[in-house]
Amino acid sequence: MSSRDYILGRVRWSLGRGAFERDSCEQLEARLNTPQSNLIPKRGQGDAKAQLSLFVKMATEVNATVSRLKALENVPKAVAKYLKEQELDATVRLADHPELQKLDWSKLDASTGFSTGDDLVGVVMAYAGAAETGSLALRSGADSPTTLNFLPDYHIVVLKAADLVGDYEAVYARLRRESNKTDFMPRTLSWVTGPSRTADIEQTLLLGAHGPRKLHILVIEDNGEAS
């Protein structure tokens, strides 16, 4: 018996599906290769307009701020406006994403790459958004370093409205489709719902405990088809 067979057999036993059988491992692997959707709330199942409204509502309820832009080209100006409102220097660290790199950042002191912890403001592109909870799905990769999602105090995320879906399962389905085509699965898919928070100490809500203190989302409404 291989270690793999033993582990899968133990999983079956722990689920109360009988003693170890070699065929059971093959059945378990088949189920893993054909995943079934989990419970999907009706809350996010409206049309695109309803999903966008719900996303904004849910995101703001968890202390994120949201700006809706007509075009991707407006992102640098919107970032500069946000920095001014927060009384911050015009310095940002950008993900090396092609959609961000093609924009005109000349009015800002912008650098590109992963963060080493010295950056106050990070700007990234979201892989997707889920309307049901106002959450952002952030895929890791060379064009989307995970450090920019957690180290800067101010987290600015650009989300194309075409990449907004109703629920989490739709995001996972898209990720599986794309990974099957490219034979590549990202090392990390991070779900971000509002800025970092904790209430461990006397049940008092504290923002920025384990990551960014503020989350600002720029939703691009005029962006064509989802990537």
Image: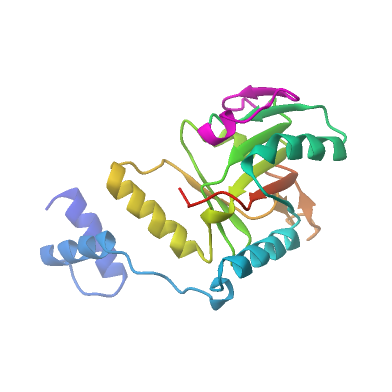
Q: Specify whether residue 151 is in view.
A: no
**Lateral position of residue 86 relative to residue 127, left or right:** right
Part of the protein shown in magenta: 97-117
**Lateral position of residue 1 relative to residue 38, left or right:** left
**Lateral position of residue 172 relative to residue 148, left or right:** left
178 shown above or below 122:
below
Colour scheme in use = rainbow
Q: Residue at x 62, y 25 (%)?
A: 116
**Lateral position of residue 64 relative to residue 136, left or right:** right
Q: Residue at x 67, y 49 (%)?
A: 70
Magenta: main secondary structure equals: loop
x and y percent of residue 153 in the render? 73, 37
x and y percent of residue 216 in the render? 72, 46
Q: Nearer the viewer, residue 57 or 148?
A: 57
221 shown above or below 47:
above
Determine the image quadrant of residue 108: top right
Let me know if residue 21 is in the magenta part. no
Q: Specify whether residue 185 is in view.
A: yes
Determine the image quadrant of residue 10: bottom left
x and y percent of residue 105 in the render? 68, 26
Q: Residue at x 25, y 67 (%)?
A: 12
Let me know if residue 102 is in the magenta part. yes
Task: Residue at the far bottom: name it.
Answer: 42
x and y percent of residue 90 in the render? 79, 27
Q: Tag count in the figure?
A: 0
Q: Nearer the viewer, residue 88 or 206?
A: 88
205 shown above or below 144:
below
130 shown above or below 178:
below
Determine the image quadrant of residue 53: bottom right
